[in-house]
Image (cartoon, helix red, strand yellow):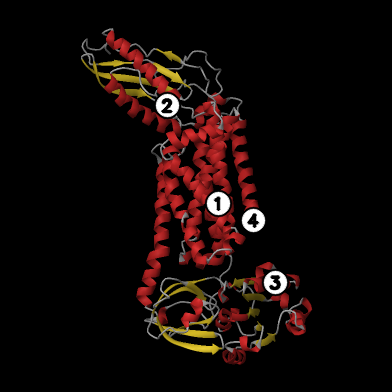
Amino acid sequence: MPARRGGAGRRLLLLIFWAGLVLAVLPWWLTTPAGSLSDSGAVALAAGRIVGLVAGYVMLVQIVLMSRLRLLDRLAGEELMTRWHRDIGGALIVAVLAHMALILVGYGALDGVNPLVEARVLATGVPDMLTAFLSAGILTAVGLFSVRAVRHAMPYEMWRWLHMSTYLVLYLSFGHQFSLGQQLFKPGVVRTGWLAAYVGVAVLLAYGRVIAPLVFNLRYALRVADVVAEGPDTISIYLTGRRLDRLKVLGGQWFRFRFLARGLWWQSHPFSVSAAQNGRWLRLTVKVVGAFTRELRELESGARVFAVGPRGSFTAARRTAARSLLIAGGIGITPIRAMLEELPPGATLIYRASTPADVVLQREIDWLARARDVDVWYVIGARTDPGPRQVMSPTGLHQLVPDLERRDVWLCGPPGFVEATQKLVRRSGVPRKKIHLAAFEL
Amino acid sequence: MRRAALAVAGLAAGTSLLVVAKGGGGAAPDTVAAANAGPTPSGSPSAAAPPAPDAAAPSASGKPGTKQSAKPKPGKSSTKAAPPPAAPPKSNKVVGPRVQNPYGAVQVVLDLDGNRITAVRTLEMPDVEARSDQLSALVESQLGEEAVREQGADLDTVSGATETSEAYKESLRRAIERMKNGERD
């Protein structure tokens, strides 16, 4: 059973974030004489500079959040990093646009021209400004592509490549910060510190995204050992490698897998492990839903696998109570099956599936139910059928699990299922902090 | 979504607060400004000082202590540089006057070979503000080269840096006049 991890890591990260923000704006405070902001142009410039410093800082934070450092995952969980990245992302774009508008108004007032003329003057006459405008444009576009509805309208790989262009934003906006940033353009502690922050972020990024995955794969050298049918449209892929006894992975965690076989090597997909760590093999269980997953059936044993992970904080380490209720929807059973081995005994599992044929890994689950004292309820049928409707209601849940409010609740399945079930569990009186989510994107 | 909106609201509120905190304390800006800006040559023009009609600003201070602020806009006025120190009679340089503009002041020095300009250097350029610093560098390199080529002050204007270009040309023109009068510094 993994040791529990509380909220201390999260609080530490928040503390670092706020301290960094203060440090970023502090130079403005120290170098701006009090009472100097006497006309509206000066006020706009000052506000523009503050917002610019904030935007520059937050931009770096965004990259650290997505650097896939194991440390961040351990401290607060990768899901939280992703959520913060999302929340901050919108604010970052607003900050960049506000920075641009305020500076244009401020300089416009100083030069006695309107902001649009000022924009043209800056873009054509001042070094580094054309690229700065360009980077603001790219960032805004990336932000719009990340709006959920737009994002889901395009293939994931395409979205991912578009999103990668934010690295271009970093590069294009770099120059104007140092040549034109009022707090940064003169050599000194502030400029050096800002530069050091960039170098630090680049190092973290290179480590998390390149070095750590390479080391992982060189060390463990994962290969396909076997592909096994679990049901009419579900397969399990067994992986072996070297030194797997030293690999630390928790049930509920996932890897991004790239199978180095013909027709498959160019794309990578996230899969949870469907069995707890055993020192000899890893297993992922996959529902065959499209072209890619169909090809996985044809994988030959011995094919090399490049894995990035393990990632995710949907693990028994995040438990807050002694007992748990796990609710799996469809193929969402796979991480939950792995977690059952690591949660304290006495858990309850509700397994929702549309048809009996969709139930997978049933023999293992029944075996675990006996070994670890788990109550298992298979709830089969469409959402509108009387059985599932009765169980998936506050009354139904309380009948199955009378001490529901005192338990951790773990939800895993397709996004719609997770969202609906989360609302149901909240309505049934479980505090938000006790609800743990993992939504599968199929 | 709600958290993103909160972050934006927080940013707006925080920024306003900072600006108000800085802008509000205008009671005795002279001393406060000096205290805040660190090592400052005393007597530099302060933000709230009454706008001097003609730049009575001290020409000796190379680095005005106050950062960009509501600078008095004295139009285009110029001040003669402090009288040159007693120099050897046949020096090969001549200093132009210090020409003030809204962003700072420009003062050029001509390096001479007889009555030919070999290089134009600057003693002072607007550099308090980051953008001015950038533009000053542009003006200095472009106009400096052009002045040597043309051997005169009838030069182009660097786009985006009209005021500084004009001030530069003014200082240059007067320096050339002095050169033609045989003056040397």
Q: Amino acid at mark 1?
A: Trp
Q: In the image, residue A21 lies at what x, y percent?
A: 53, 48
Nearer-the-camera pick, A156 or B95:
A156
Q: Are marks 2 and 1 on the same chain?
A: no
Mark 1 falls within which chain?
A
Residue occupied by mark 3: A420
The disc label shown at residue B3, or none: 4
Q: Nearer the viewer, mark 3 or mark 2?
A: 3
The reply to the same-chain question for discs 1 and 4 is no
Residue B58 horizontal side relative to residue B145, left or right: right
Q: Amino acid at mark 3?
A: Ala
On what subunit does the disc labeled 3 rest? A
Viewer can see residue A14: no
* Residue A34 drawn at (x, y percent): 56, 31
**Does dot 4 land on a helix, a strand or a loop?**
helix
**Secondary structure found at label 2:** loop
Q: Tell me the mark number nearer the camera, choosing from 1 and 3.
A: 3
